[in-house]
Image: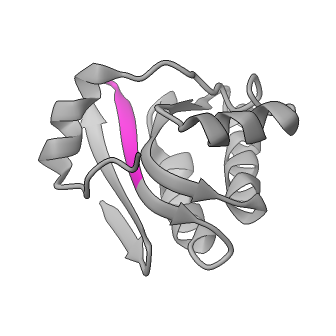
Amino acid sequence: MSVSAEGFWAKVVGLDDDTVVFLSGELDMATAPELTGLLGTLVAQGPPEVVLDFSGLSFIDSSGIAALVDSQHRLNEQKRRLCIQGAQREAVRVFEIAGLVEFLHVQTDRVEDRAQLREQAGSPPVAG
């Protein structure tokens, strides 16, 4: 399952009992609806934890953050959660300022073992 819009790409890849959503490009007002739709499907019928790999994401604005917060609220109702991994320093700082690091389960360490999955997903190169 994948979605794309100009300047944004997201692909879902299974990993054990969890799901990893690889993101690339810019998550903003124009592209947040694409992620919202994709996450809506995973909220409706997904695993206990939905991992978002931000390593390819170069930008996120308030619309992107709102999509994440909404999805986390819906997952909380089901005793499930999002987990954000591989976020660039700037994105982590935004989550810190907004007080969302714990709520969105933002992990600041890179997950190297996901590199092979990213390659299998056929994703664009990691932003950097």
Location of residue 79 with respect to 88 vertically, above or below: above
Numbered range of the magenta stretch: 16-23
Quick check: 113 left or right of 109?
A: left
In the image, is residue 79 part of the stretch drawn in magenta?
Answer: no
Q: Position of residue 121 (x, y in %)?
A: 19, 50
Residue found at x 71% / y 60%: 61
**What residue appears at the point 50 percent right and 28 percent down from the top-left corner?**
49
Residue 24 is left or right of residue 105, and the answer is left
Query: Residue at 33% of width from left, 25% of height from top?
Result: 17
Up-down relation of residue 45 to residue 20 (above or below): below
Question: Magenta stretch containing residue 22, yes or no?
Answer: yes
* Towards the viewer: 51 or 57: 57
From the viewer's perspective, tell me whether residue 96 is left or right of residue 17.
Answer: right
Q: Quadrant of the N terminus?
A: bottom left
Quadrant assignment, res 36:
bottom right
* Residue 16 seen in this snapshot: no
